[in-house]
Amino acid sequence: MARRALFQVSPRAKWGDRARAAAGVLKSFSLTVQPDGSLTAGLDVDAAAGRADTGNLNDDLPDVFESIGSAARETGVGVVFLFDEIQFLSKQELEALIGAVHRTVQRQLPITFAGAGLPQLPGLAGDAKSYAERLFKFPMIGELPELEAGQALTEPARLEEVEYERSAVDVILRYTEGYPYFIQEFGRAVWNLAEGPTITDEDARSAQIIVEAELDESFFRTRIQRSTAEERRYMRAMAELGPDAQKAAEVADVLGKESGQVAPLRARLINKGLMYTPRYGYAKFTVPQFDRFMRRYMELEAETPPDR
């Protein structure tokens, strides 16, 4: 799936038969999946003819996983594959990945897989392979409960002999709403701003201005740059209705249009990972507080949304 990778093994490495076979399959795969040469191999073994060399991802990737799993079983180790932003894989890539994991499960090989993505991931996986819901678990990782969010702020500080005023914690939790990345950014900003061994309510309120500006620039704006002017108008109309999941017809009403007229915009925003559908007929922003950002970013009545 990666567009660039380099596999390197020491010339002194001792290879078992299965491990050498796995290396050969891996080399075959890396030589053929990306015919432009961007995926290369540095293994000191010959490519394995007839395994992972068809150029068809759905055929080759399961061969790669099976060969690696067989080698891992022979050597008494396990292998874990970690993927992020899975929602951006094409349907063919996701289908191949699920098929590869499925084969390792069937062969009872010591390979496991963990992936992260936006909330639409279970639906995408199910569309790619109907058995995905039986093969994987899809735990939802959302906002931290208040107690845990507060501990994420105060416990690391306490290790450095710094305390938070209770009112400062309240300010931060109220703004971040338990979202881990926001807590991290707010904690960093208030730490850098505070002068004493106690982080005060005033420190937290001053840091909030910094945090909001930095999130706008580095977190929200990078997402909105993937959208067109008309897509931004749709998101601004949705933001007018609040942070919860919104009915497609009601967003269309805000724009003064029929649902069918704006349905293509909504579909493109879902495909770009800016929105997802928690239930039929509704859509929600994939990151928290995006509605606040859209209200800061542009006016609802703007004829030409800003391209910045």
Image (spheres, grey):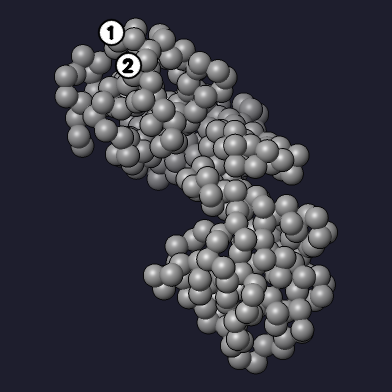
- Circle 2 is placed at which residue position? 261
Q: Crowding near pointer 2: few (<14 within 10 Å), some, many (20+)? A: few
- Secondary element type, mark 1: loop
User: Which residue is at 40% across, 8% downward?
Assistant: 250
| Residue 202 visible, this angle | no
Asked which quadrant contains residue 233, the reply is top left
Q: Amino acid at mark 2?
A: Gln
Above or below, 210 against 90 in this view is above
Furthest toward the bottom, the residue is 12
Q: Is residue 233 left or right of residue 21?
A: left
- Circle 1 is placed at which residue position? 256
Single out the mark in the foreground, 2 or 1. Answer: 2
Q: Position of residue 47 (x, y in %)?
A: 60, 81
Mark pair 2, 1: CA separation: 10 Å
Q: Nearer the viewer, residue 109 or 106?
A: 106
Quadrant (top left, top right, bottom left, bottom right) of the C terminus: top left
Q: Position of residue 67 (x, y in %)?
A: 71, 70
Q: Position of residue 285 (x, y in %)?
A: 45, 26
Asked which quadrant contains residue 193, the reply is top left
User: Which residue is at 29% across, 27% downward?
Assistant: 232
Q: Which mark is residue 181?
A: none
| Residue 8 visible, this angle | yes
Asked which quadrant contains residue 60, the reply is bottom right
Q: Is residue 90 left or right of residue 80?
A: left
User: Which residue is at 71% across, 37% downward?
Assistant: 133
Q: Amino acid at mark 1?
A: Gly
Q: Position of residue 295 (x, y in %)?
A: 31, 20
- Secondary element type, mark 2: helix
Above or below, 31 against 293 in this view is below
Q: Crowding near pointer 1: few (<14 within 10 Å), some, many (20+)? A: few
User: Which residue is at 41% across, 73% downward?
Assistant: 37
